[in-house]
Amino acid sequence: QVQLVESGGGLVQAGGSLRLSCAASGRTFSRSTMGWFRQAPGKEREFVSAIAWTGGSTYYADSIKGRFTISRDNAKNTVYLQMNSLKPEDTAVYYCTAGSRWGPVVTGNAAYDFWGQGTQVTVSS
């Protein structure tokens, strides 16, 4: 079992930055693929980014590539999402997730076994 708790969301102006954190409990964190998804009002949950358990491989959605950076600290059981140059369309609830698979499949919900409760990010224009 892996329990996930997100933090770091909030209200920011367009062009600003936020860093989301996801603290994980459970022995399997260091071997887990970690991901971030987001869901805007009235829209389906969408993939944002994922990082392999080694930290050496990552995936990014095209919509955030070059602006967001995912990283992890296995010693602290924490994964981060640094979000720069935020846009109003980045407004959403952001979810941290953990799974055991790697490869292109990690861009889909089905690759993950555990989800956090989410943290709200609101970007004002």
Image: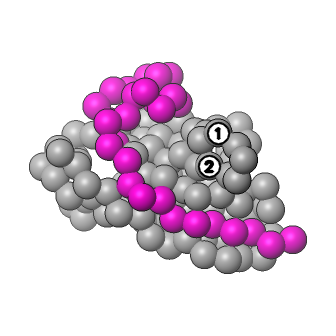
- Residue 114 location, quadrant: top left
- Residue 55 location, quadrant: top left
The residue pinned by badge 1 equals 44
Task: Say left or right for 11 vs 99.
Answer: right
The residue pinned by badge 2 equals 39
Q: Amino acid at mark 1?
A: Glu
Q: Residue at x 32, y 57 (%)?
A: 4
Q: Secondary structure at mark 2?
A: strand
Tell me which segment is drawn in magenta.
Answer: 98-125
Quadrant occupied by the C terminus: bottom right
Q: Residue at x 62, y 49 (%)?
A: 39
Task: Say left or right for 111 vs 107.
Answer: left
The answer to whether the residues at label 1 and label 2 have Cβ atoms under 8 Å apart is yes
Q: How many marks?
A: 2
Comparing 108 with 102, the one in front is 108
Task: Say left or right for 76 vs 48.
Answer: left
Is residue 107 inside the magenta stretch? yes
Q: CA distance from mark 1 to mark 2?
A: 6 Å
Point out the residue furthest to the right here: 125
Residue 123: x and y, percent?
A: 74, 69
Residue 47: x and y, percent?
A: 58, 39
Q: Is residue 124 above or below residue 80?
A: below
Residue 28: x and y, percent?
A: 17, 44
Q: Amino acid at mark 2?
A: Gln
User: Is residue 99 in view from this perspective?
Assistant: yes
Quadrant occupied by the N terminus: top left
Residue 29: x and y, percent?
A: 23, 48
| Colour scheme of the picture | one colour
